[in-house]
Amino acid sequence: MNAPLLPANPAVKMWEKPPMGHVKINFDASVNNNRINFRVIAMDEGGFVIGGGGGFKDEIMLIEKAESYAFDESIKIVCALNIQIVVIFETNNASLVNSVKHHCTDFIVISAQIKESIKALETFKYAKLCWENRCCNTVADFISKKLCSVACNWFFDMDYRLEIHDFAICDAI
């Protein structure tokens, strides 16, 4: 048997807790059957879920626009949860992260949409957007699957389903 050209280097990926006094907001979007699906989960520095949600929008759009829409919705959910401390938004979409970081010099169409999101971030004490590996948040994946099965919008605060608690514990350990 021949040895593989590239050695297997398995990496264990898991959600990382934010620094003390910070809240992480993980959001994502997907496009399927002429609708977009978005999901948002908010966790504190202890790994506890403090809220989240998700939903659908029946509209045909590119994934870049869908991710931008999910970013807007995540900001709305954070405001609804009355989170006003340091917020770290996480997404697996590098294009969105780069567009936000370079919004002053970026002239592509999505930048016009992102400028409104950036303006909304001014309501927080401090907020930033970071890239995170998709496999690092099983809670967001659960929300996505749940919303796909029932096709509805959903918002929750600290009073949430037991399944979310179980996935959050797995993510935090």
Image (tube, helix red, strand yellow):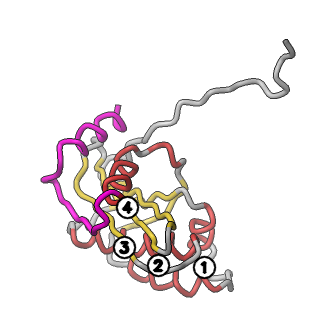
User: Front-most of 149 and 122?
Assistant: 149
Name the image quarter holding residue 96.
bottom right
The amino acid type found where label 4 is placed reads Arg
Q: Which residue is mark 2?
A: 118
Amino acid type of the residue that numbered disc 1 sits on in the rendered structure: His
Residue shown at the point (50%, 66%) measured from the top left: 32
Q: Which residue is mark 3?
A: 73
User: Counting other residues with Cα less than 10 Å from the Cα at mark 4, is it few (<14), some (14-19), or many (20 or more)?
Assistant: many
Q: Position of residue 87 (x, y in %)?
A: 36, 61
Label 4 – label 1 distance at C-alpha:
24 Å
Residue at the spot 32% in from the left edge and 60% down from the top edge? 147
Tell me whether circle 1 and circle 2 mark residues in contact (CB < 8 Å): yes
Q: Dot 2: what SS? A: helix
- The residue wearing badge 4 is 39
Q: Which residue is painted at 59% across and 30% down in the image?
A: 11
Mark 3 → mark 2, Cα distance in angstroms: 13 Å
In front: label 4 or label 3: 4
Tell me the distance, in whole angstroms, between the alpha carbons under discs 3 and 1.
Answer: 19 Å
The residue stretch that appears in magenta: 149-173
Query: Which amino acid is tagged 2?
Result: Ile
Relative height, residue 112 to residue 1 (above, below) = below
CB atoms of marks 4 and 3 within 8 Å: no
